Amino acid sequence: MRVSAKADYAVRACAELAASPHGDPVRADDLAVGQQLPVAFLERILGDLRRGDVVVSVRGRSGGYRLARPAEEITLADIIRAVDGPLVTVRDERPTALEYAGSAEALLDVWVALRVSVRDVLDRVTLAGLVAGDLPPSVRDLAARHDAWVNP
């Protein structure tokens, strides 16, 4: 799986919003500085997040962006889907829309298993958990595997 820059930046910006005291709105410029992100690109990402009901924009002098729901209710999967669409696609199709025959017939099960494994991580990590460093045990276990940090 490839995590796009757009998805990475979106998660980091949302983490900054989740860390904002009392859920106060944060200006795009401040989000960009906090995570060292290009502000013009971030503003487009924030538009996608707004359309995806992950953030809301607040107008006015003390305006900016804030999370649309509590950080405990927003998963990393919600954020990535808002900016990039479905988590796992094959040739831009969801695995369940594919069919294989003959020697490649079992490949569909592989793609579906991949989708499930990605969901097992991204649907379980909330923004609140990310910001607090309190990741689910299943995610910590995967990251702690002896082969997790080794490039094949």
Image: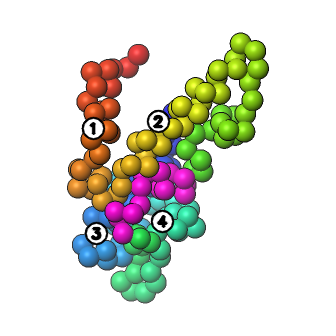
Earlier sequence position, callout 2 versus callout 3? 3
Q: Does dot 2 land on a helix, a strand or a loop?
A: helix
Is 27 left, or right, of 95 in this rendering? left
Residue located beneath label 2 in the image: 117
Residue located beneath label 4 in the image: 54
Q: Does dot 4 land on a helix, a strand or a loop?
A: loop
Q: Residues within 10 Å of mark 4 (few under 14, many from 20)?
A: many
Question: Magenta span covers which residues?
Answer: 70-83
Earlier sequence position, callout 4 versus callout 1? 4
Earlier sequence position, callout 2 versus callout 1? 2
The CA span between labels 4 and 3 is 15 Å
The CA span between labels 3 and 1 is 25 Å
Proximity of marks 2 and 1: CB atoms separated by less than 8 Å: no
Q: Is residue 73 part of the magenta span, yes or no?
A: yes
Going 31% across and 74% down the picture, which residue do you hit? 23
Q: Residues within 10 Å of mark 3 (few under 14, many from 20)?
A: some
Among the 4 quarters of the image, the one containing residue 34: bottom left
Residue located beneath label 1 in the image: 140
